[in-house]
Amino acid sequence: MISGVAILGAERRLRARILLPMKRAALLPVLLCAACSGTGIHLPFASVHAHAVHRFFPDLDRRENAVRYGRWNALESAWNAGVTAEVDRRLEASFRETMKREPDYPPDARLCAPVFAREAPGLFGALFDADRLEQEVTDALAATDASPETTSSRVEKSLERYRRSRFALASPAAAPVDPRLSELSTARLLVEGDWLFAHAAEDLAASAFRDQRWKVKATIDRFDVQFQAPSAPLQSSWYKSFAPTFSGSYAAAAELFDRATSFRIEIFQALLAPDPAERREAARAVGRRYGISG
C-alpha cells in the first residue's frame, strides 16, 4: 500500500516539474533584455518608450504610417518617371487609399522605393535616417514615464546616434520652394502629413500624459478634415511655425526635422526636370549641397 507521505512527495515532484519550465519562460524576456542592452539589439519590450506612439496613440501612428508610405511611394515614382500630371493623379489616388487603410506598421522603405534606394543610396539613407530619428523622438515624447529630464536624455541620445551617421544632413540655406509643386495634389497631401507630424509633436511635448490623449485626438480630427481638401501652402519650417513648445525644448531636433523637410522638397523639385538623366543629376546635386554623396 502506498503511504500518504509517498503520495504527497510525488505530487510535489510533479508540481515542481511543471512549474520549473514556467519559471524559466517567465525569466526569458528579462534575460533577453539584459543581453540585448549591451549589444545594440532593441526588442519591442526592451524599454518603456520604444514604440510608444504605436502602443498608446494607435490612431496617430496609423496616419503617420500612411504619410510615410506616401513619401516613399512618391519618391520612387518621381525618381523613375519624373513628376508629371499623370503620375500625380496616380499617386494621389494611392495615397488616399493608403490613408483609408490606416496601416498598423510603418513601411519597409527598401520595398517601397527599391530603385531609389539602389541608384541613390546616399539620398535614400539621408531620408531614412531622418525618418527614423523623427520616430524615436516622437516615441520619447509619448512614453508613459516621460518627464523633462528623461525625454531630454532620450532625445539627445537619438540625436547623437543620428549625428554619427554618414547620412546626417548638413545645414545649407534652404532653397525657395518651386511654385510648380503647389499645383500637384500629391505634394499638397504630403504637406498635410508634415503638418500632422509637427502638430502631434507639439501636443505631446506641451502636455502631461493625462492630457495628451484628447489633444492628439483633436489634431487627428482636424487632419482628417484637411486631408480631404488640402490647402496648406508648401513650406519647410513646420516645427518652427507650429510646434513652439517642442522647438523651445528640443531645438536641435526641431531644426533637423525642418531641414529634412527642406531636403525632401528640394529633391522633388529636382525631379521636376523632364529628362531622366538631368533630373537624377539635379537630385544628386541637392544631396551634395546637404553633404550627402551618392
Image (cartoon, rainbow, N blue to C red):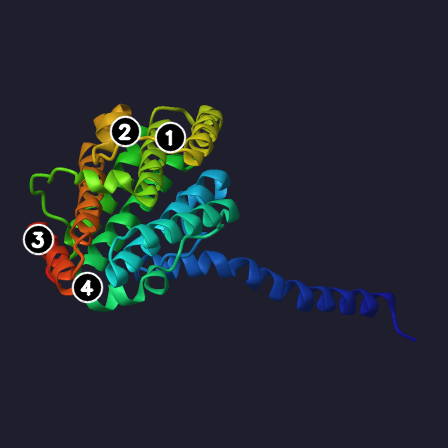
- Which of the two discs, 4 and 2, sits closer to the camera? 4
Residue 120: mark: 4
Say whether disc 4 or disc 3 marks the residue closer to the N-terminus.
4
Q: Earlier in the sequence, mark 1 or mark 2?
A: 1
x and y percent of residue 61 in the render? 44, 43
Question: Who comes first in sequence, dot 3 or dot 1?
Answer: 1
Q: Earlier in the sequence, mark 4 or mark 2?
A: 4
Q: Are marks 4 and 1 in contact (CB under 8 Å)?
A: no
Real-space Cα separation, disc 4 to disc 1, in angstroms:
34 Å
List x then y, in percent, for residue 264. 22, 47
The reply to whether dot 1 and dot 2 touch (C-beta < 8 Å) is: yes
Circle 4: residue type: Ala
Q: Secondary structure at mark 1?
A: helix
Disc nearest the viewer among 4 and 3: 4
Q: Which residue is mark 1?
A: 204
Question: Looking at the rendering, in which quadrant would you find the N terminus?
Answer: bottom right
Q: CA distance from mark 4 to mark 2?
A: 32 Å
Secondary element at image label 3: loop
